[in-house]
Image (tube, rainbow, N blue to C red):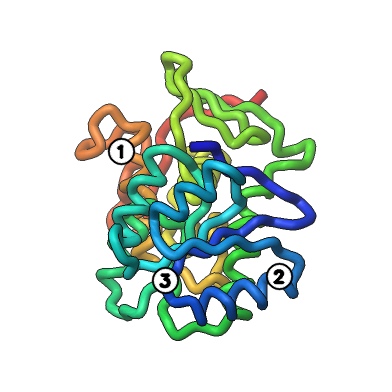
Amino acid sequence: MPDYKTSVETPHILIVEDDRDICILVARYLNNNDMRTSIAGHGQEMDLKLSHDPVDLIVLDLNLPKEDGLSICLRLRNTTNVPIIMLTAKTEEIDRIIGLEMGADDYMSKPFNPRELLARIRAVLRRQTNGRDAKSRKQFSFSGWHINRGLRQLLNPDGAKVTLTGAEFDLLMAFCEHPGRVLSRDQLLEITQGRSVGSFERSIDILVSRLRQKIESNPRDPEFIKTVRSGGYLFTQTVEVE
């Protein structure tokens, strides 16, 4: 499956939703706001479209025929780092938590205002492209790990590429830019997501857990990212910047 692309002028958004009326409404609104859209009614149709045309972001419904959205999200996370915003008719926090644990970048409950969805799409895409100026092309390293901020790429000590979602990469950069400093959940939300996208504090805990799974030798006894009781999180490593 091809990796996601980044269209600066006209982002390509894939809407995976079996409700045709919602698809048409969202697609029309996004098209009228300088975005290109494609529509898929289920996971197989999504796979077919992705094989022919890479996208910048996927809007993924939770309740889909044949294969549910959580399963699709997890499958995508094993093959690509395309940003994902999940949609669901459920409002319980546990459903939002499960979606984030599966690797979604954001979450919205139905019914929703297309204007709010547009704002969230722009916020996620903005986080993906924040590192494109000269300053962001710096190289970071810690304990044998190497980060290319411009390419948004992480290499482990063996030189192998480690796939991170956009939110996971932004969280790692927040830690690398503030090593040895306790960062509260509120601070991490502001740095990585911003309050305007409707994030909640539990999402930071989920992101930290996901990041630990990828960079810690023992995520249950983390060496790099320490939890500070009633404080937040502390990145313990010395970070070198080139």
Question: Residue 65 in the image: x percent, y percent?
Answer: 31, 65
- Judging by the rendered image, the residue that carries numbered circle 3 is 18
Residue 220 found in image quarter: top left
Residue at the location (76% across, 51% down)?
A: 8
Marks 1 and 2, how far apart at CA:
38 Å
For label 1, the residue is 213
Viewer-side label of 1, 3 = 3
**Image quarter in which the C terminus is found:** top right
The Cα atoms of the two marked residues, 1 and 3, are separated by: 33 Å
**Pointers 2 and 3 in contact (CB under 8 A)?**
no
Q: Earlier in the sequence, mark 1 or mark 3?
A: 3
Comparing 65 with 154, the one in front is 65
Residue farthest to the left?
A: 220
Q: Is mark 2 on a helix, strand or loop?
A: helix
The x and y percentages for residue 163 are 45, 34
Amino acid type at circle 1 is: Gln
Task: Report crowding for label 2: few under 14, some 14 to 19, many 20 or more residues within 10 A (C-alpha).
Answer: some
Residue holding disc 2: 31
Residue at 59%, 80% in the rendered image: 25
